Image (cartoon, grey):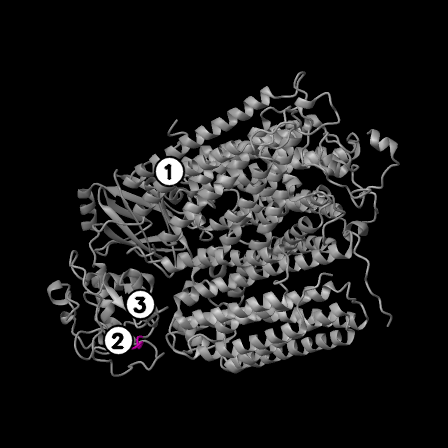
């Protein structure tokens, strides 16, 4: 606060124009991030409503609330909206957009106009998809498996896939922008070894965005062509191979899972460091494991196809490779845990989310190993076991990290503190509600309940009721932050530039930051996370670790 | 507990017990890892919370030793479920030779099963205890998936291509069959039952269902379509002989060799020019769209029935016969002969008999 | 602006070589080489692509980052091709339909 | 028309050097996405060519090798003119720059015209899947698959070339207005990278689509 009191009140990016056009035509990465926050929140609640109706329907084994056709459209809408219009852009386009230039000491991303364009492309793609949803929906599931999507479905497949095709360009431009920015826009002294882990994980995410999304684009284009022209690209009647579609789809969609978790890992690395008040243990291993995930993540898509009629040879190879990709994730978990050793931990809301993330990610990740084990996958593939697994990663992982990151950087983005008590209450509600929703799904999946079932055998009911009960708690958990965060915009306590006492560059500028992030370009002189060391306490000027454990240097 | 809140599905096949062992191993080891990590998180959180005397953290950069340890040990350990799972998967992919061969046709939204002797069932499959059952499956429309939780068996059923699954039931009873690949409107109602019976009961059940065998249905269709006009033993043959073919290796025009299995035979019927046998002209018309999957299955079953006797020595690749087919009877693209095409040149009773002594030797 | 170190002459010579290679690949396509036709044609195409990248696109004088980027594109394309064809080409290795 | 040289970097950059590095590197990253976009089609093509060698060879024999060959030459020469245009921009020869950009546009349009003629022949031969396709004989499905990939791959290539010609046309106008200097001409270099990439794609399309099944 003292810094703010001495300097004249800084002009913030928020105050930099108040008209609607100053927002809609802005090239400021921070304002674009806010635009994304608003749009993806909207999308999250659209997808959430679909999920809610589904969970209520599944209270009883009979299909008594909605028709089969409506149910099929509901899970498709839920999947399409949540995957492409919420999860993929969630952390990168909001927190990433806001923070990457600040964290590396740049005035903006390398291509600000492209950044704005990618938001409009996102809107355009969303418009296509929502048009399809409002005009009768689409019922193929988010995977658009052929030949159902090309020959059998009578719903709006083409406009939905075109919506996703368009959205893909938004993803590509965002990834391209991040990569170029991280390569060329770093402040003096900001070497690769000094990049915050949040930036490293976004760099890895961007690699996937740039390399995988074009394949999805061409695949969905082929589906649309087959459907419109009534020709056989994947249709076996005309010599096509439906498995080829699955290969090309999962070449994108498996790495896309890492698009949906890597940024969350980056957030958690920051949160653990900030509230342990400690350097991240094994910085270079955590950074390198992000890149390893980005590369290895491309080698394992076949494990979605073990029961699909793929050759046994390919299945064996993909299974082996699938185990490899688990290792870098494990490295991250071990390093986060080790970071807590010898720390000085304060339990603010963001840390609760971070700890929740680690717990849920461990469960979700380990059950991923079940799916990589060929014979086990045969039994649980396409059942609720898979549904539970990827919700542990995507909701338990990514959404939890997003909530944690949003709370941690909320004071930076808005200049206001959220109410701490409500924050903790919401974090706890989400954790409990989440586990009650999705843990029973592991069991019901192993029992043999296939996913995308509108009616189901009565012996699965008890577990489904538990799951629905959990979902209602979870819904409350997600509504709470929406309310108190909005409340804090007006009535929240002024945050000041650095409410957490964190050393990152984003905390060295005012809250909210000025339009070009820094008054003068910062010069970086030390590695990230340089918190005070107990062994030099009493000497406030020396914040460097005096002793190095092991031979590994930061 | 178990009836009100079941935790494991019933186990009614050899594959189920073997899989549960691996599954429980994974559950136990995952639980152990989870507990260790959670214990560390909780202990560290309590012990290193900020309090008087612990206002400042002890900065640790990292440790190569620890990093190497927790990279290599998980990598090594993960090879256990890989090899274990891969072995089971390989067995699940390799049906035994003595398996009962049941043909499965899936379509939106029903299952049709055909026993070797022609008994057919819809949404219900009767099988005996203790006998391996091999399913050769195909779909008439979109992708479905044959899933019996009690057997831990699942296999996608594709249009245009055969896939295989097998199981050996261990306990009599009724077990759920579910479609596990989303296939449209009534996907969740595309369910049925696998009825496992004691062998004697099964034999009784089969007897009450009596019907014409699949192979003989196929034989009749073979003649109706006029296939035997070209696929014949004498010098008028314009196409390779089919007796003794099944399970042999065939040399194709481009020099490659293929195994004459169900897929090959089906493909050769609907797309004859795709795999032209060495020494023959690509004159056969396509039967794509002319035959239902059930009809194709009967033809495949017929050609299988006139294959070499089980246990016959594996012969050399079938040689190409010297006489070249003189004419192209259809001129390429002419419509296929209707079932009313006159007089198959080979009388039915002279059609190749299954006796291996006459037809099994490919060297003739 | 960093000089590319490539002169007009180099461009013209490269273009001439590319044209010659085009003629060569078309001519060789009629040679009865069996499966080697494809190998030869793709080999020549790869040579031409490499020439364009090195000379016209200045990869020869480019930074390590640029080269790494170009190599990454090819590497990931190889992953996509290898993984997909690994399935397509090994179907039917087990004597069971669909395996 | 007053010369309006742009020698000030955009506000997020420190200097022109950084801006130039960012835009060149950005284009390379974009080209990697293009590799993957075409790569998806190449993968599908490769799978089907492996499954249906006869049909794909048969389809290839229906290609017009003269147009395909001439078009390859046209694109190679256009790559040369683009490279020379960049050279002219670097050395500040405005008239040469205008000439080479103009030549590039002409060659691009020539390619597209020849391509249109070829498409028209396929239309007359009823070889356009989904719109006008009739192929007699047992290989019909396979040949149709070949032509599907032919039209999708060359079609997307043509879309890329159209974009390229449009961008070069804009550059021509800007160059005419004296927008570029030896210090600041990144747009020309970046467009050149794109143009060369489109050329490389065609160099692979030629053997895959035209030169199969002739030997």
- Please report whichever mark, 2 or 3, sits nearer to the chain's N-terminal start: 3
Any part of residue A553 in sight? yes
Tell me the residue that label 2 is attached to.
Answer: B279
Tell me the residue that label 1 is attached to.
Answer: B80
Residue A368 is a magenta residue: no
Any part of residue A135 in sight? no
Tell me the residue that label 3 is attached to.
Answer: B256
State the image coordinates of residue C47 (x, y, percent, origin top left).
52, 69
- Please report whichever mark, 3 or 1, sits nearer to the chain's N-terminal start: 1
Left or right position of D150 against B13: right
Q: Residues within 10 Å of mark 3 (few under 14, many from 20)?
A: few
Q: Which residues are magenta?
A: B279-284
Give the quadrant of residue D21: bottom right
The label nearer to you, 2 versus 3, is 3
State the image coordinates of residue D26 (x, y, percent, origin top left).
67, 57
- For disc 3, the chain is B
Which quadrant does the C terminus of chain B fall into? bottom left
In the image, are marks 2 and 3 on the same chain?
Answer: yes
């Amino acid at each position: 606060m003292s810094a703010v009191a001495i300097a004249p009140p800084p002009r913030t990016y928020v105050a930099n124009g108040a008209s609607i056009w100053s927002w809609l035509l802005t090239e400021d990465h921070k304002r674009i991030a806010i635009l994304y926050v608003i749009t993806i929140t909207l999308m999250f609640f659209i997808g959430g409503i679909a999920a809610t109706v589904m969970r209520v329907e599944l209270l009883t084994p009979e299909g008594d609330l909605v028709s089969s056709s409506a149910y099929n459209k509901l899970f498709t809408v839920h999947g399409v909206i949540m995957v492409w219009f919420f999860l993929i852009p969630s952390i990168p386009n909001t927190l990433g957009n806001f923070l990457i230039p600040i964290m590396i000491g740049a005035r903006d991303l390398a291509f600000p106009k492209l950044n704005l364009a990618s938001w409009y492309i996102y809107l355009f793609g969303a418009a296509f998809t929502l048009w399809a949803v409002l005009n009768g929906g689409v019922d193929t599931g988010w995977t658009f498996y052929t030949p159902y999507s090309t020959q059998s479905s009578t719903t709006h497949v083409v406009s939905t896939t075109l919506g996703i095709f368009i959205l893909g360009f938004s993803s590509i431009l965002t990834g391209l922008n991040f990569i170029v920015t991280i390569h060329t826009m770093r402040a003096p002294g900001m070497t690769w070894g000094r990049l915050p882990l949040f930036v490293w994980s976004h760099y890895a995410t961007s690699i996937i965005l740039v390399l995988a999304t074009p394949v999805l684009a061409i695949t969905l284009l082929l589906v649309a062509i087959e459907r419109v022209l009534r020709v056989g690209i994947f249709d076996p009647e005309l010599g096509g191979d439906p498995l080829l579609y699955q290969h090309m789809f999962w070449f994108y969609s498996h790495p896309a899972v890492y698009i949906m978790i890597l940024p969350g890992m980056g957030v958690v690395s920051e949160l653990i460091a900030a509230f342990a008040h400690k350097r991240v243990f094994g910085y270079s291993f955590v950074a390198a494991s992000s890149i390893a995930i980005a590369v290895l993540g491309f080698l394992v898509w076949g494990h979605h196809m073990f029961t699909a009629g793929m050759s046994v040879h390919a299945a064996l190879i993909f299974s082996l490779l699938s185990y490899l990709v688990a290792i870098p994730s494990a490295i991250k978990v071990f390093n986060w845990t080790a970071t807590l050793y010898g720390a000085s931990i304060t339990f603010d809301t963001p840390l609760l989310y971070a700890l929740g993330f680690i717990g849920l990610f461990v469960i979700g990740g380990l059950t991923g190993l079940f799916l990589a084990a060929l014979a086990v996958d045969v039994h649980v593939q396409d059942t609720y076991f898979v549904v539970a697994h990827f919700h542990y990663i995507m909701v338990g992982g990514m959404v939890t990290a997003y909530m944690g990151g949003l709370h941690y950087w909320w004071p930076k983005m808005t200049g206001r503190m959220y109410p701490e008590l409500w924050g903790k209450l919401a974090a706890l509600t989400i954790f409990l509600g989440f586990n009650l929703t999705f843990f029973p799904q592991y069991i019901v999946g192993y029992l043999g309940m296939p996913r995308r079932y509108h009616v189901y055998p009565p012996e699965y009911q008890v577990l489904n009721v538990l799951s629905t009960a959990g979902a209602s708690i979870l819904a409350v958990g997600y509504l709470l932050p929406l309310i108190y965060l909005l409340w804090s915009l007006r009535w929240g306590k002024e945050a000041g530039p650095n409410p957490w006492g964190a050393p990152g560059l984003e905390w060295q500028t005012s809250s909210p930051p000025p339009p070009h992030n820094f008054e003068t370009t910062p010069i970086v002189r030390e590695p990230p996370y340089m918190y005070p060391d107990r062994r030099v306490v009493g000497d406030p000027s020396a914040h460097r670790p005096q002793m190095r454990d092991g031979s590994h240097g930061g | 507990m178990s009836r009100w809140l079941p935790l494991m599905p019933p186990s009614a096949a050899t594959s189920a017990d073997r899989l549960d062992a691996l599954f429980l191993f994974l559950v136990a080891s995952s639980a152990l890892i989870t507990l260790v990590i959670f214990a560390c998180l909780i202990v560290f959180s309590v012990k290193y919370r900020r309090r008087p005397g612990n206002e400042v953290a002890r900065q640790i950069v990292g440790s190569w030793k620890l990093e190497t340890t927790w990279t290599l040990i998980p990598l090594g350990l993960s090879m256990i479920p890989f090899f274990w799972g891969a072995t089971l998967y390989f067995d699940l992919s390799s049906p035994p030779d003595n398996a009962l061969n049941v043909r499965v046709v899936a379509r939106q939204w029903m299952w049709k099963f055909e026993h070797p002797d022609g008994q057919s069932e819809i949404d219900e499959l009767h099988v005996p205890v203790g006998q391996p059952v091999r399913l050769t499956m195909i779909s008439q429309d979109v992708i479905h998936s044959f899933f019996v939780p009690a057997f831990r068996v699942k296999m996608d059923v594709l249009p245009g291509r055969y896939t295989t699954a097998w199981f050996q039931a261990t306990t009599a009873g009724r077990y759920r069959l579910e479609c596990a690949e989303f296939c449209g409107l009534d996907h969740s109602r595309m369910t049925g039952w696998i009825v496992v019976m004691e062998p004697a009961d099964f034999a009784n059940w089969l007897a009450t269902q009596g019907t014409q065998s699949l192979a003989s249905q196929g034989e009749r269709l073979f003649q109706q379509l006029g296939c035997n006009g070209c696929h014949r033993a004498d010098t008028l043959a314009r196409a390779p002989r089919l007796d003794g073919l099944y399970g042999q290796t065939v040399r194709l025009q481009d020099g490659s060799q293929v195994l004459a299995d169900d897929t090959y035979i089906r493909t050769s019927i609907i797309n004859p020019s795709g795999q032209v046998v060495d020494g023959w002209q690509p004159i056969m018309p396509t039967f794509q769209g002319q035959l239902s999957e059930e009809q194709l299955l009967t033809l495949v079953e017929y050609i299988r029935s006139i294959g070499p006797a089980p246990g016959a020595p594996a012969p050399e690749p079938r040689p190409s016969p010297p006489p070249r087919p003189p004419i192209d009877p259809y001129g390429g693209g002419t419509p296929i002969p209707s079932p009313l095409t006159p007089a198959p040149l080979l009388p039915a009773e002279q059609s190749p008999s299954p006796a291996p002594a006459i037809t099994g030797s490919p060297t003739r | 602006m960093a000089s590319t170190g490539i002169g007009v002459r180099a461009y013209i010579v490269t273009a001439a070589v590319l044209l010659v290679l085009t003629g060569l690949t078309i001519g060789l396509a009629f040679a009865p080489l069996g499966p080697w036709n494809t190998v030869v044609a793709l080999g020549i195409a790869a040579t031409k692509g490499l020439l364009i990248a090195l000379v016209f696109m200045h990869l020869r004088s480019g930074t390590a980052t640029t080269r790494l980027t170009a190599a990454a594109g090819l590497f990931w394309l190889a992953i996509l091709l290898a993984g997909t064809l690994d399935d397509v080409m090994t179907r039917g290795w087990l004597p069971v339909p669909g395996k | 028309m007053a010369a309006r040289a742009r020698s000030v970097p955009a506000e997020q950059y420190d200097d022109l050097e950084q801006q130039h590095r960012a835009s060149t590197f950005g284009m390379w990253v974009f080209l990697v996405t293009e590799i993957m976009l075409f790569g998806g089609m190449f993968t599908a093509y490769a799978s089907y060519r492996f499954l249906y060698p006869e049909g794909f060879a048969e389809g290839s024999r229906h290609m017009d090798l003269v147009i395909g060959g001439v078009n390859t030459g046209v694109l190679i020469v256009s790559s040369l003119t683009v490279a020379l245009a960049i050279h002219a921009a670097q050395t500040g020869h405005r008239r040469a720059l205008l000439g080479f950009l103009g030549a590039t546009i002409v060659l691009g349009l020539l390619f597209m015209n020849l391509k249109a003629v070829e498409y028209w022949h396929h239309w007359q031969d009823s070889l356009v899947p989904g719109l006008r396709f009739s192929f007699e004989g047992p290989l019909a499905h396979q040949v149709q698959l070949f032509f599907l990939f032919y039209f999708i791959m060359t079609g997307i290539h043509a879309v890329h070339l159209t974009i390229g010609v449009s961008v070069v046309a804009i550059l021509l106008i800007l160059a005419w207005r004296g927008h570029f200097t030896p210090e600041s001409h990144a747009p020309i270099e970046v467009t050149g990278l794109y143009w060369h990439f489109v050329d490389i794609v065609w160099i692979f399309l030629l053997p895959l689509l035209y030169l199969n099944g002739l030997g």
